[in-house]
Image: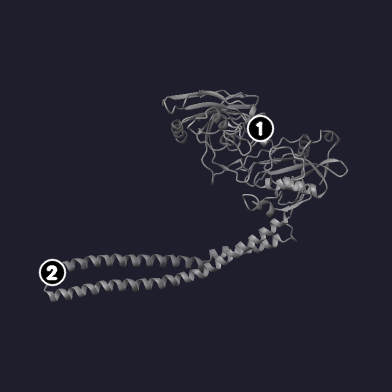
């Protein structure tokens, strides 16, 4: 499993600290290890897996691969290799570290118990599809509907009879007293008969419905029993499985999946937790006495339709599955400080483009928050609060992503805020963004419509999702082509989180990330996305106002 470096690689500067896995630039040694693995993956292999590199297909699946630069007990530098989940329908391939726990071990507990659960699933499917069950369910529904119709018809007839008797009573005054008494008696008896008939009808239908329901209950009790057994077995198997995934850290402490995720908002591990590259690599290194020095993970193959994963691009460890596990596993390692917490915002200036007593228009710098974050307070909001301490408006009417620069409207007065909000809600505010793409694109202009939702397990990343995503639409037009890159204007019709970044990077969008996009493309000096113009109606004068600031890239 240990691959020693060649002399030219071993001469590279040694990593000063271990990689912060959730936001990093790969160390040169990790890049060398990744390139060696990529070269091996490009050669004929002993196993077969369709990565979609020769031809895109629905069955092709790209995979995340990882390398861990380590030092062994003899002081030699080398690296370990891993892949996420399964490759070639196996979690044991030569040259790669094994899973922390092999649930697919034929001699283990998982497969036999999974087979029992599958058997229950087949029994459940058969019970639900049983002709006798379908007939019993249909019969009960039919009888219940017939009962409802019969009782409703009888009640309607009772109302007709009641009106008729009322009319007859009014006409009794013309009869002699003795005849009136007899007639009233007959009418009263008719009323009682209607009610008795209703009672008998209810009892009759109630017995018929109950008989049909009893037959149906016999089947549904069997189905419920199977569901309950499946639930109990699944829960028991899940807990047993979580207990087997026990992760080491640098000080020799073990903690299992259940205990790790018990402290998180999830409460339980999400599917696939513990099967990613980083936990597998670190666990193997600790087990075998290797000193971890640097980590890198890259995507190999065709991108999934929902996510944005580009062939050979490096990616950080995911937040939902890996962050809780790695928070435990990194204890005892000298890890780089999080770049996410390192802010140089005090050096950034928020330029005032326009201001009056009701509103202001500012130019937000790149890598600067619109509102305070969890760890960084400095933001457009705090700067504006200091500049306008007597503001009656909320100041922030709309936001820009932290990495995006450009124009923002600030509501100083409550009166201005109300009308500005209406314009943003009604989408009458016209915004134009300027972006520089990593690659040129074939068309001059067009519209991108890709629905989006948040990635629950890897925030703040966003996914394209046609099932649960919200509509997102962007119009684009190319304004310049140079050195294999395209510069363009982007006009978002909707305002989803990371909409422009995803629409540019996704394979069904422009298929070219914005330069400097560290989430969906490749990190650079900054994200080359700028909100360069905005047009709206002044909330007080009701005049159309327009502001524009060109990007600095």
Residue at the limit of the structure toward the right, as seen here: 74
Please, is residue 239 above or below residue 307 in the view?
Answer: below
Q: Nearer the viewer, residue 432 or 20?
A: 20
Kind of element beneath mark 1: loop
Q: Position of residue 505 (x, y in %)?
A: 61, 35
172 horizontally vs 14: left or right: left
How was this image coloured?
one colour
Picture quadrant of residue 230? bottom right
Q: Residues within 10 Å of mark 1 (few under 14, many from 20)?
A: some
With 503 as the anchor, is 313 left or right in this view?
A: right
Which of 365/96 is in front?
365
Toward the viewer: 476 or 498? 498
Q: Which residue is mark 1?
A: 343
Q: Residue 370 at x, y = what percent?
A: 57, 33
**Residue sitting at 73 percent across and 45 percent down?**
278
Q: What crowding class fits label 2: few (fewer than 14 Cα within 10 Å), some (14-19), or many (20 or more)?
A: few
Q: Earlier in the sequence, mark 1 or mark 2?
A: 2
Q: Nearer the viewer, residue 397 or 136?
A: 397
State if disc 2 and disc 1 touch (CB < 8 Å).
no
Where is residue 411 drawn, in percent x and y? 49, 30
Considering only vertical position in the picture, is 176 above or below 344? below
> Dot 2 corresponds to which residue?
173
């Amino acid at each position: 499993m240990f691959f020693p470096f060649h002399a030219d690689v071993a001469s590279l500067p040694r990593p000063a600290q271990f990689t912060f896995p959730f936001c990093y630039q790969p160390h040169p040694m990790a890049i060398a290890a990744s390139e060696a693995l990529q070269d091996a993956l490009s050669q004929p292999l002993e196993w077969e897996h369709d990565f979609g590199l020769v031809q895109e297909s629905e069955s092709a699946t790209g995979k995340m691969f990882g390398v861990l630069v380590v030092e062994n007990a003899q002081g030699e530098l080398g690296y370990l290799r891993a892949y996420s989940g399964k490759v070639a329908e196996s979690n044991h391939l030569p040259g790669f570290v094994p899973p922390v726990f092999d649930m697919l071990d034929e001699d283990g507990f998982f497969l036999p118990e999974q087979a029992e659960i599958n058997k229950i699933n087949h029994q459940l499917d058969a019970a639900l599809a049983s002709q006798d069950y379908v007939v019993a369910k249909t019969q009960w529904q039919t009888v219940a509907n017939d009962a409802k119709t019969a009782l409703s018809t009888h009640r309607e007839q009772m109302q007709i009879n009641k009106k008729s008797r009322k009319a007859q009573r009014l006409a009794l005054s013309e009869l002699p007293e003795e005849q009136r008494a007899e007639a009233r008696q007959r009418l009263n008896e008719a009323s009682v008969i209607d009610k008795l008939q209703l009672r008998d009808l209810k009892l009759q239908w109630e017995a018929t419905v109950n008989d049909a329901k009893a037959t149906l209950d016999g089947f549904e009790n069997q189905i419920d029993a199977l569901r309950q057994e499946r639930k109990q077995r699944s829960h028991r198997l899940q807990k047993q499985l979580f207990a087997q995934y026990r992760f080491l850290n640098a000080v020799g402490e073990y903690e299992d999946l259940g205990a790790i995720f018990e402290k998180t908002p999830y409460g339980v591990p999400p599917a696939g937790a513990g099967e990613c590259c980083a936990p597998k690599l670190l666990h193997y290194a600790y087990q075998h006495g290797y000193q971890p020095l640097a980590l890198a993970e890259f995507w190999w193959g065709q991108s999934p339709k929902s996510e944005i994963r580009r062939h050979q691009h490096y990616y950080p460890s995911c937040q939902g599955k890996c962050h809780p596990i790695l928070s435990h596993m990194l204890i005892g390692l000298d890890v780089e400080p999080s770049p996410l917490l390192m802010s140089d915002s005090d050096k950034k200036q928020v330029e005032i483009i326009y201001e009056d007593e009701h509103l202001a228009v500012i130019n937000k710098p790149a890598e600067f928050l619109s509102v305070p974050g969890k760890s960084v307070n400095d933001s457009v909001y705090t700067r504006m609060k200091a500049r306008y301490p007597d503001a009656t408006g909320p100041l922030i009417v709309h936001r820009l992503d932290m990495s995006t620069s450009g124009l923002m409207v600030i509501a100083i007065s409550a009166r201005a805020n109300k009308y500005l909000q209406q314009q943003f809600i009604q989408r009458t505010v016209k915004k134009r963004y300027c972006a520089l793409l990593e690659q040129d694109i074939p068309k001059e202009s067009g519209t991108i419509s890709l629905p989006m939702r948040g990635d629950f397990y890897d925030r703040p990343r966003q996914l394209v999702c046609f099932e649960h995503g919200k509509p997102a639409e962007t119009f684009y037009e190319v304004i310049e082509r140079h050195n294999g890159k395209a510069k363009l204007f982007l006009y978002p019709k909707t305002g989803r989180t990371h909409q422009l970044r995803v629409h540019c990077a996704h394979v069904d969008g422009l298929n070219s990330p914005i330069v400097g996009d560290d989430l969906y493309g490749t990190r650079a000096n900054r994200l080359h996305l700028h909100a360069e113009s905005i047009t709206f109606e002044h909330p007080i004068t009701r005049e159309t106002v327009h502001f524009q600031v060109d990007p600095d890239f």
